[in-house]
Amino acid sequence: MVHFAAVSSPDVRPSSPLPATNSSPAQSGRSGGRRRRRGSASPYPSSPSLGGFETPPPPGRRTPSGAATSRQRQNWTGRFPPTPSTPMSTDDVPPSSEAGDEDTPETDGGGVDADAAPVFVWGTNISVQDVNAAILRFLRHFRDPRDAGRVDPVMDEGKYMRAIHRILELEGGESLDVDAHDLFDHDPDLYGKMVRYPLEVLAIFDIVLMDLVARIEPLFEKHIQTRIYNLKSSVCLRNLNPSDIEKMVSIKGMIIRCSSVIPELKEAVFRCLVCGFYSEPVMVDRGRVTEPHICQKEQCKATNSMTLVHNRCRFADKQIIKLQETPDEIPEGGTPHTVSVLMHDKLVDAGKPGDRVEITGIYRAMTIRIGPTQRTVKSIFKTYIDCLHIKKTDKSRLHIEDSMGTDNPDANKTAEDVSLGDKVEKLKELSKLPDIYDRLTRSLAPNIWELDDVKRGLLCQLFGGNPLRLPSGANFRGDINILLVGDPGTSKSQLLQYMHKLSPRGIYTSGRGSSAVGLTAYVAKDPETGETVLESGALVLSDKGVCCIDEFDKMSDNARSMLHEVMEQQTVSIAKAGIIASLNARTSVLACANPTESRYNPRLSVIDNIHLAPTLLSRFDLIYLILDKADEQTDRRLAKHIVSLHFENPNIEEIEALDLPTLVAYISYARKYIQPRLSDEAAEELTRGYVEMRKRGNNPGSRKKVALTI
């Protein structure tokens, strides 16, 4: 609930910026007889009176009158945090302009009377009129600098005015994504206020936005929300501290858990059991539903006869996800930190476990009760993020989408999207080069010397195959599994690390530190609900990605046995603790191992050197032997290559290779739009090679025989 203080006379002191925003304002003798609301339950101890004013309760987001309230802002008071949705009085907000009115000097088109007394937000020195005017100027007049050289008449209109027109034309979007960098470039002061006081500024942002929408299309009924993203700086999870509470933050991490969709009551309707009279909708106030004690019908007036009618109530979707630090942000000797994130409405199911995301939201705190039936709370608080926007991160990874939380992806096109066609044309020109295969090979892990055949196989794994689905219902996987076996010091682990950084989703793990349930899934209790839930393991988190397993030969037999179903059927079946489920694990497995005697023994066969069961070996599509052979010329070239990497100005031979962004874009485009089919010559070559390898496998001197598959 947003509180505004009107300066009506010189005797009334305006509010000053105070950091504490959660204590209730005291009753004061302000003129005008304006009614005040009681503040919400504070998660902090109430502050004592400071002169003629006290700090206000936390304001909530509101919508203009007549618009459906759909934005959620949370104050947790129980296991599932409720949303404050108390109806706002008309004198608490700046009066909204009438739909369709033109700009006048009195209103300036922003819905606030320019000649009225200054209005300030409780606890701050933020002038509502100034913020309103600044937001209006930004939405109307901001132009992308990249559009300056374009002669398209459409570009003469502001960037966000074009986005608003697209939303109104398509009638599919319910949010306007606003780039915080654009806001900072246009008005740094407004950007600072938005980061420090996001609840208040975003509430005004929504009001101004709906005023603009009402002027353009008076009959537009949907409520458009503002979603801020791409802040100037992001905060590491472990660096969040109490000074960031009630401020807008941007954090990056990996989703490790998603709860089920929780229906949250927003408006309640009651029916009298005596006369059948239906009450007016009752708004949920900070998680509390006020049940009418008396029937409102004049002829009835029965007491304690009202019952809740579920099919007439209004609910909103809510989801709780758990975000964890990525391995590259964890300091030496540290363990990953986690934080709970609340998703609402259209953001629900925007991310899934294993996604690396950047979340922009408001850092909030909630109280913890001593007992479930006691109202006494502890002095320790629990923090969470109230999500405003979510998008995938790390553009150096394959097939990354720009945004996951956009209702209408066409509503916020920028000049960067306009140049997408030029990038596609460049990629198509690259594909026509006669040496493109060699260029791609040299571009993969260029710091690793030679191993061209291995790199070609890894490229095939990144490009992937086409899954085959027959009319009979049989499915054949299209992902490629690769095993690297070789002597120590042959760059196997470095290849795994490079593939892990390049793959869109995936987990890097070691065989000795991996258990069977850690690879697949395990049963745990949800700390929020106390219910038994499934926690995804490394293979499930790597769905649609690459799971890299180092020291594969040192993995326990129990853990390796769990890979049989994953590598062939690409599912994980669980039946424990009353949970029977089948999880998708459509992942490519990249494993590396050492030979049986740590070094390759040429006196033994290849199968005998690899200490793995034939049932598991048959599920690897490519098996590479990387041997460390002593050769003076080869060793000299390898030593020069390694030493040159440590030179201050390395004089490395110039080779035609693709840079990392181009390589990522090339593979991503091929995976998404190209579906190759086998030619007759390729089919004949595969058939011939399969028959020949089957003959070699029938060697009577081998103790192990592997059934080759195709």
Image: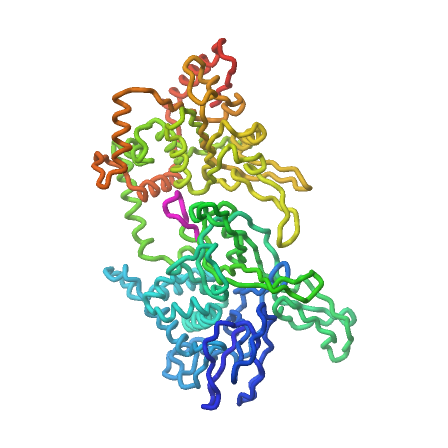
Return the x and y of residue 499 as percentages of the image width and height: 40, 37
In what quadrant of the picture does the N terminus appear? bottom right
Q: Nearer the viewer, residue 199 or 496?
A: 496
Res 45 → quadrant: bottom right
In the image, what residue occupies the spot 50% across and 22% down? 611
Region rendered in magenta:
390-401
In-image side of 273 versus 444 (left or right): right
Whole-percent x, y for residue 657 in the image: 26, 37
- Give how far across and how far down residue 681 sits, in percent: 36, 22
Residue 383 is inside the magenta segment: no
Q: Camera-side residue: 379 or 196?
A: 379
Q: Is residue 244 visible?
A: yes
Q: Is residue 680 above or below residue 77?
A: above
Question: Is 396 in the magenta?
Answer: yes
Q: Is residue 152 left or right of residue 42?
A: left
In this rendering, the answer to whether 334 lies above or below 16 is above
Q: Residue at x 47, y 64 (%)?
A: 244
